[in-house]
Image: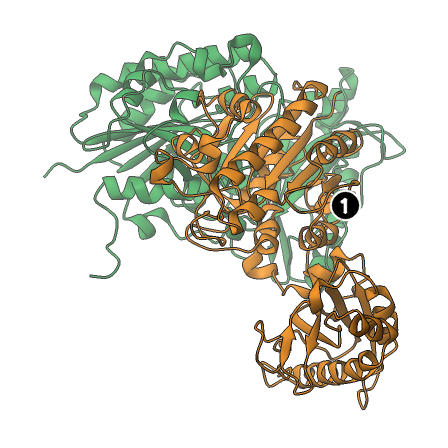
Chain colours: A green, B orange
Amino acid sequence: MILNRALLVICDGMGDRTHREFGDETPLGIARTPTFDQLASTGSVGLMDPVSPGIRPGSDYATTALLGYDPRVCYVGRGGLEAAGAGMELKPGDVAFRCNFSTVDADSTVVDRRAGRIERGTVEIARAVRAIRPKGIKDLRIDFQATVAHRGVLVLKGRGLSRMVSDVDPHATGVRFLKCEPLDDSTAAKRTAAAVNDFVLQSAKILKNHPVNAERIREGKPPANIILPRGAGTLPPFKPLHDLYGMKVACVAAVALVKGVCRIAGAEVITPEGATGGLDTNYGGKARAALEALRDHDLVILHVKAPDVASHDGDFRKKASVIEKIDDAVGKILPSLDMTSTYVAVTADHSTPVNVKDHSGDPVPLLINGPGVLRSNVSKFSENAVSRGNLGRLHGLDLMPMIADYLDKAKKLGF
Amino acid sequence: MILNRALLVICDGMGDRTHREFGDETPLGIARTPTFDQLASTGSVGLMDPVSPGIRPGSDYATTALLGYDPRVCYVGRGGLEAAGAGMELKPGDVAFRCNFSTVDADSTVVDRRAGRIERGTVEIARAVRAIRPKGIKDLRIDFQATVAHRGVLVLKGRGLSRMVSDVDPHATGVRFLKCEPLDDSTAAKRTAAAVNDFVLQSAKILKNHPVNAERIREGKPPANIILPRGAGTLPPFKPLHDLYGMKVACVAAVALVKGVCRIAGAEVITPEGATGGLDTNYGGKARAALEALRDHDLVILHVKAPDVASHDGDFRKKASVIEKIDDAVGKILPSLDMTSTYVAVTADHSTPVNVKDHSGDPVPLLINGPGVLRSNVSKFSENAVSRGNLGRLHGLDLMPMIADYLDKAKKLGF
């Protein structure tokens, strides 16, 4: 018996609105996408609301939904996903924070939220601050890890912690960094806020005279003299995908938040060389990694951030050309797939209209091709074409059950 | 930066079923609606279930859903909406009742539920009964207001009240009026029922010898010698639309229940001269009032009751002609709207098939036109045409989030 497999291509932020100056079409609508078009025409197509119509999700929120977890119930902040994305171990009850290495002046005013986009020395800084023990707070341990460039993750470990605390990062320059405040009346939130504030002050003392910063100042670069936590979050209560759907899942991704969501869902996370999460990512390498992963996984998710990057830049043509690169990369591995036993789905996690330059609540296009699917006969994979497609309008939460069903993994309910 | 605006036209009861004798078309399907057709063709269209498929809502229940409040959770009776529609102040805990001025004979049998559709003298009667203090019930105040013709609103104010009480109005003639009964075992329901029964008896005593009725009897008209409360309700727990969606909302409407729902949702309610809630309403004046309101509101709701009135009369052609009047009125203001920054949506709050002569659970047609929407290319705005449209099938609860998203007001969830 041949086991069915599925490849799910998530083109981050690919969905868009129609643009008058491009003949009332979207970037996907004008992109030359022969692979997607053929898969759409001989497969099923429709619109999918990542959460529900009009709801604007972040990539982490939307990916949570696409993996089958209702984010309205399961989304518990950014920090836990960042920690998991960085490969840090997180236990239920731990509270994690996305952090920036930043630059403040003598007056505590934030001068550069990214410390000159610091590249070197962050591992040494992380090692130094990891030794901090917040004063006057019992049974609390901390972990800290530098990730990419100016980014890091702080984890508070122990009992009696809460994610209901505010950001230290003011999300702006020219203003003083903020005090972490409890967002509810719980003892846990007060304790967590106190720990964060103490960590920030202790780390500032350590960083002030740290050799990495001494060298940066000599070189005329802004020192990483403060760590600014934000986005407190805990471990989302995901049951593993394997337990829910009986599927062994891999995810090829470069973006920490997406890797975090997938890792917590029990997926194997693969980041091939040259996968950057940017416009310059290794499109072909990621597609080949997905092909390789299909050999020993039931479902492989191929996540490409680039369309969202072009969208945030507001560049219609760049977005179309990035979509063409994904189409081309998928087209190159398609001949190696046995389409009598493989399903290929292509969609986006959310829309990011190039005129909005941010995520919107518009639905995303979806195609599913594979043995036995209903045929759409559309001639193009585009938002306009699939809006009259044969899948109707789906919710993001529908996707995993549909894939599990095609893979003959779905449990029958009742008799 | 130009701020997007939205006009939402709600044609009360416009949705219908197909009728064999009209070529398997609906009233909207045969109506000459060039404005709606053009908006539908260059916009997005679909079917929308006000609540969910097959669920039959009243206008208040459906409007609650269309404003984004789940009526299955938030609908707390008619009385509170009537009170708000009449401009009465209602506090959480107060219980309000829709009332009729009615005529009973010496045996307490209801002879005329509308007291000969009394027009004059109701304000004086209201003033007289407003002074009633229910006996033996502490810390209870009452408010009473006459609204239009035989209609009024009673509000019980104070602590320990409940909307779980039955109607005094028997909804029929030739039978005695009913005793208000508690519908659960709570002290509050018993206390409320006792207060209502005492109010009805005290008001009957006052009305028996009231000068307004003495004159009516002299004129051979049925006296308004009793007040029959029904539809106990409290203040719905709506968060204001502005807090939920960041939108400043106005509603142009004539019907008390709709005005009440909108007012409680924090919308400014506008009732232009000649807006009657009937077939003879001032279509053009209401559309112009909506245009005017768009100058300083993000969303303007234009509610027209007339299609529902024609539907309850069972008059297919009348319904079609009323829809044509709305189309014409919207068409006249359309040239004044900047369609590069304005969204126009047209829908119904529910279907009222002319053969049923009452609300049904059929879906309603919906069109949304404005910058960036996907194009339907349908040639007609009708239930048949939009049922194969590019919005698929939506829920009433989806409408507000979609509008907020188009107006760039939606909050992003996650990162």
Q: Is residue B165 above or below residue A175?
A: below
Frontmost residue, A16 versus B57: B57
Q: Which residue is mark 1?
A: B269
Frontmost residue, B234 versus B283: B283
Q: Secondary structure at mark 1?
A: strand
Q: Residue furthest left?
A: A1
In this rendering, position of residue B322 left or right of residue A181: left
Q: Count up the numbered dots.
A: 1
In this rendering, position of residue B273 left or right of residue A260: right
In this rendering, position of residue A365 left or right of residue A147: left
Q: Is residue A123 visible?
A: no
Where is residue B50? Give x, y as percent.
Answer: 51, 48
- Quadrant occupied by the N terminus of chain A: top left
Where is residue B193? Give x, y as percent.
Answer: 68, 83
Badge 1: residue crowd in 10 Å (few <14, some 14–19, many ≥20): many
- Quadrant occupied by the C terminus of chain A: bottom left
Q: Is residue B222 visible?
A: yes
Q: Quadrant of residue B82?
A: bottom right
Q: Quadrant of residue B78?
A: bottom right
Tag 1: amino acid: Val
Where is residue B115? Give x, y as percent.
Answer: 70, 69
Could you tell me which residue is drawn at 73 percent across and 46 percent down? B243
Could you tell me which residue is drawn at 73 percent across and 42 percent down? B275
Could you tell me which residue is drawn at 40 percent across and 24 percent down? A272
Q: Quadrant of residue A304?
A: top left
Where is residue B322? Give x, y as percent.
Answer: 58, 37
